[in-house]
Image (cartoon, rainbow, N blue to C red):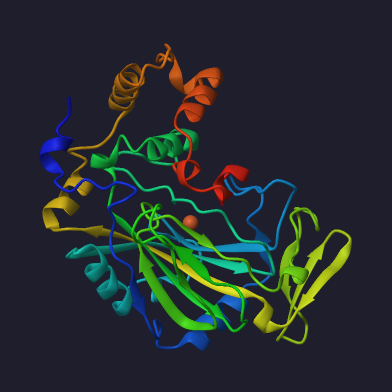
Amino acid sequence: MTSSASTVTAMRTDKIMAKVVRVNDVFDDPDGLLNFLFNRAPFNLIYGKGGYEKAGGAEPWFREHWITDGVVQVPGAENYLQNRKLIDAAKEAFDATVIRPYGMFWNLSGPMIAGRPHLDTSPYRGIDDTKWPFWLHVVIHNSQLFIPWAVPSTTGLILFYRGSIGGFEFWPNGPEAPSEQALPPFWNYGLVTDNEFMFHRPMAIGKAEDHILPGTFGAEAKLHRHPDGRQWQVIDDTGVRFEWQPETVRASLVWKAFTFKDQKAADIYDDHSDDLNYDIVWQVFGEDLKARGSSLRIPADPLNDREFRAKLLAEYPNPGLRYFEDARRGQAA
Ligand SMILES: [Fe+2]
């Protein structure tokens, strides 16, 4: 069918993944890093970005992109990308030799309920999110049918949070084995993981009575530095809605890197000699739908057939739905 079977040796599934490597004191100058971030306030909500909605409206989760697919969005961010400790941890986690960092973004979260157990969407050779529809990328990942084209990729999560409630839960031995938790306080503390194939979630932040439920403020709200420079304010169109002490907000930097086993694997990625394309995608889905006894068939114009898109997404839901009661409450976040 394709050349992928001969060029990719390690198959990955939602039960086989890299180990989690913990890293202390990730950055040499955490105060300088945080000052650089905080001076860029105000920050926008993540609400409204595809796949991040919880029912009921916006919640106190803000995001700042620094580097996306190797493109620097915030000049100066590149100084933090080639972090030696994260690169070494990624080599260890994935038993890889070629580590290529390509992304950084920040999450800033206020008191909120837990996220749902989920997988992040893996990169795949040949899928360019600026050209491919994102729903197709999601259903490709959900289906787990295209793992030979998945680009091994790591997520380094570097946490800064002096509050007492607001951990990270993960399932390093698969979704049916007990989870592990990393619990605060955290400062400059890293977890280098395989979030594309390891279920994980942010745990609730802050005490239950302080949680800000989805929809409490407007979708246009922003997280501002308080004029005193130490505190935070959430401001929407109606004014200042919340004021928070520094320890109320959990800052986490997400660092993404490709983790190639060897130079040959990196070369296959670079030279596009074994990329996915639409023909392969529809062929694989078509064969699997038949094999599973589905009556769904690939239509003449699958990219523009909205009914087909809905049915394909229903046929291959987020794998978390199979394992977690929580994940059935809505889309993963
Ligand atoms: Fe995630």
**What residue appears at the point 54 percent right and 25 percent down from the top-left corner?**
310
**What residue appears at the point 19 percent right and 37 percent down from the top-left corner?**
274
Q: Position of residue 120 (x, y in %)?
A: 44, 51
Q: How many marks?
A: 0
Q: Nearer the viewer, residue 199 or 299?
A: 199
- Left or right side of 125 for 46: right
**What residue appears at the point 36 percent right and 69 percent down from the top-left corner?**
192
Which quarter of the rendered picture does the N terminus lie within?
top left
Q: Position of residue 324 (x, y in %)?
A: 51, 48
Residue 330 visible in the snapshot:
no
Residue 328 visible in the snapshot:
yes
Q: Nearer the viewer, residue 188 or 105?
A: 188
Residue 1 position (above or below residue 186) = above
Q: Nearer the viewer, residue 274 or 179?
A: 179
Please, which residue is most extreme toward the right here? 238
Residue 273 position (above or below residue 248) = above
Q: Position of residue 64 (x, y in %)?
A: 57, 64
**What residue appears at the point 38 percent right and 35 percent down from the top-left corner?**
143
Q: Position of residue 184 (x, y in %)?
A: 54, 80
- Left or right side of 221 for 254: left
